[in-house]
Amino acid sequence: MGNQNANGFDHSTQSGLYIRTDKPFYFAGEQVQGNIYLNVGGGAFPSSTIYLKVKGSEKAKWSETKTVWEDVPGTNPPQRKSKQVTEHFDNENEFYQHKIPVYIFQQGMIPQGQYTFPFNFKLKENLPGSFEYQEKDLECRIRYSVKAEIDSPNKTLDKIKYKQEFLVREPIKEQINQNEGQQVLQPTSCCCIPLGTILFKFQFDKSAYQPGEVAQLQVEIDNSQSKVSIPTITGRLTNTLRIVSKQGHTRLIFRSCGSSMIPGLQPGQSALNDQKKNMTLSLVDQGKHKPLDPTTNGKVVMNNYQLSASGELDGICLCCTQTPGIELPIRIVAKPIPSYDQPVVAPSGWNPQVMNPVSVQFDDTYKYQPATGGVLVPAQNQNPQGYQNPNQPYYG
């Protein structure tokens, strides 16, 4: 049968292994349901156990180069020289690294035939959202996957396996409703002479967005009691990425992702109610010409966004007058993985035997160490038959 990691069912031999979750993405705390599909053609396969692997982790690695100064030996008077020193940082936080037996065939062989093994498990409530980011000398990611696997007792035969990644979105605990803020300003001139009163009210249409959506901003301004000109109103989208090393060293990346500008008002004018001003801001990374990376808040990787709006005031004392504006956090949710939408072609005559569903519990006894070849730890759990009838599924 061989390694089915890339192609799913092998139609040339009518053998293969495949795994599929019921959705391409989940919110943290949700129930994941899926199926392992197995097609054994050309006789029985010399193995007995169908495994489900669940993996999830956040990782970061990067390097930083800085200039240091050191004394030059043997110089009088003492001299110093500079040199470039590169430091390397990394960190990892594991959520899942489990290998659970979902079915054991009594005969020690997997008979020729077609099989479906349903499974389900509940995600942890506090998982950070899926995320990937890379630039020169920096890489960080948060990934989740399920894998179906059948070990081969014969070293000349590859394991049979198939992996599917799935996305996790952080739960949106607040209502996805309008974000708004209001300010009353009393600007003064450079001689601290009062210039009247200005009312600003900013309102964004919601607090969570899909990548590529357009944020809608409405601005109400009452400048009727002011002598100050407001030439422009500007909306901005900013991003803060924070990663933390094992030693607690923090790398902070602050970027401006995009902006939009509309005309303001002259002294004595107002834009209220039906006359309010409207602005749109496309939620894409305008500098890199790509969709925004999703919001996530792990222990190693944190990525967050802020929408802001501000007004420019002419001829005021900057020391005495507050700048009009509002800054509000927003969430960007991860887009589904495109490969999930690709159709799966089942083998001809597909009519599988459907086994009982397996409810997976993430017991530490089913953690595995990749360096040991996927051996279950502790060792005494390598023979996991914990039920009376070996023809029934194992509930791990």
Image (spheres, rainbow, N blue to C red):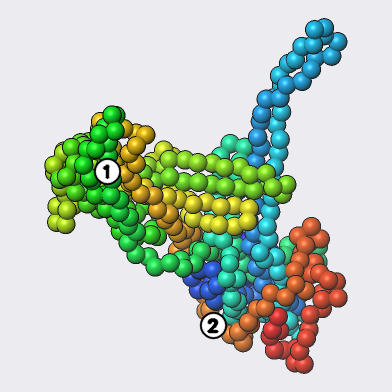
Viewer-closest of 369 and 214: 214
Residue 334 rendering spot, x and y as whole percentages: 47, 58
Amino acid carrying mark 2 in the image: Asn
Q: Where does the C terminus fall, quadrant-wise?
A: bottom right
Residue 238 placement (x, y as % from top left)? 43, 45
Q: Which residue is mark 1?
A: 186
The residue to which callout 2 is attached is 351
Residue 74 coordinates in the image, percent (x, y):
86, 10
Give the residue type that dot 1 points to: Gln
Relative horizontal placement of residue 130, taking residue 309 as reference (left or right): right
Front disc: 1 or 2: 1
Above or below 384: residue 200: above
* Residue depicted at 49% across the width and 52% down the height: 304
Residue appearing at x 34%, y 59% in the figure? 179
Q: Nearer the viewer, residue 113 or 368?
A: 368
Relative to residue 208, is residue 285 depicted above or below?
above
Q: Where residue 169 sits: x, y (%)?
A: 50, 63
Work out whether residue 163 can be spotted.
no
Q: Please tell me how crowded label 1 is: few (under 14), some (14-19), or many (20+) other residues with Cα within 10 Å.
A: some
In front of the other: 277 or 210? 277
Residue located at (59% from left, 57% from top)? 298
Kindly indicate the quadrant of the structure image that contains residue 122: bottom right
**Could you give the CA–CA distance between mark 1 and mark 2, rounded to whole angstroms?**
76 Å
